[in-house]
Amino acid sequence: MLRFNLFTRGAANRRKRAPNSRAAPVARRIAMACGGLAGFTLFLIVLLRWVPVPFSAFMVGHFISGEKVDYDWVPYSRIARAMPIAVVASEDQRFPDHWGFDFEAIADAMEHNSNHKRIRGASTISQQVAKNLFLWPGRSWVRKGLEAALTLAIEGCWPKRRILEVYLNIAQFGPNTFGVGAASRRYFGRPPARLSSYQAALLAAVLPNPNQYKVSPPSAYVWQRAADIQEQVRLLGGPSYLARLDR
């Protein structure tokens, strides 16, 4: 009787352990796949420090929809100095100094959103590069978590000037129009090296929602926003505000 009890107890224990023993290899495979994906993404980030970005995740969405994308990579040195300072003045004025996250802007946005229906964002240029380059549109905690991790990796691997260069090249400035190169040709008929300060401000003015706001013809709101951006550029000290990024 004793041996029978020991046998049945051992068999019961084996039955209890069976599901865990089957789940362990699955968990290991999932962990290995996640680790491999993270390693490959880090490899891409390091590679893209020097290699022109061929396309972004946001562009892929347009490709899948069968839409033609107007995109042309332009080096930072061939972009008018008025353009980088315009997007910094418009989108992320503390860009040269933070490490990917502007906690003061986040606090201000949280206070504003608790008292107003219209939601204000606080994403930095670095966060927008991470999102546009690797992730998908929309709002979710999963995407926000991935965006934070990618932002830290980009800030750790790229100099600030490179982050700004990539942002200017993959940001959407209008329907199917990505990057300052395509936008300057489409809306002003000139290369980005010849953009005026007002034209740069107009392009920066539509960045919050390029599907709603138009560079040409600009609405009264876009026109006023461009004027405000020019004033912010002046208060920051003009293009010289970003001179330290060249060092």
Image (cartoon, rainbow, N blue to C red):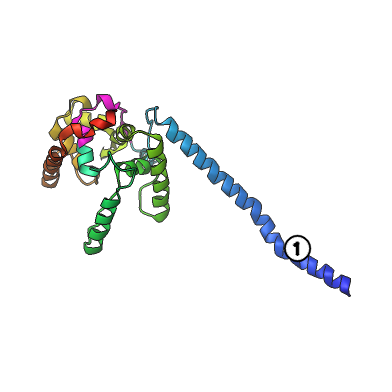
Q: Which percent across, then down, holds residue 205?
A: 18, 42
Residue range corresponding to the magenta coloring: 68-85
Instruction: Give SS at disc 1.
Output: helix
Question: Height in image: 117 above or below 136?
Answer: below
Q: Nearer the viewer, residue 224 or 173?
A: 224
Q: Going 20% across and 41% down the picture, which residue do you hit?
A: 89
Farthest bottom residue in view: 1
For the C terminus, the image quarter is: top left
Using residue 149 as the reference point, say whether residue 113 is left or right of it.
left
- Classed neighbour count for the residue bearing mark 1: other residues with Cα under 10 Å, few (<14), some (14–19), many (≥20): few
**Location of residue 210 (image quadrant):** top left
Q: How many marks?
A: 1
Residue 69 is one of the magenta-drawn residues:
yes
Residue 71 appears in view = yes
Residue 210 appears in view = no
Using residue 22 as the reference point, say whether residue 235 is left or right of it.
left
Tell me the residue that label 1 is attached to. Answer: 14
Q: Which percent across, then down, holds residue 135?
A: 40, 44
Q: Which percent across, then down, holds residue 91?
A: 24, 43
For the N terminus, the image quarter is: bottom right
Q: Going 15% across and 36% down the picture, which residue do you hit?
A: 237
**Location of residue 186 (image quadrant):** top left
Q: Which percent across, then down, holds residue 54?
A: 38, 30
Residue type, label 1: Arg
Q: Going 35% across and 48% down the picture, which residue do you hit?
A: 137
**Location of residue 234 (image quadrant):** top left
Q: Nearer the viewer, residue 69 or 133?
A: 133
Using residue 139 as the reference point, say whether residue 95 is left or right of it.
left
Residue 181 is one of the magenta-drawn residues:
no
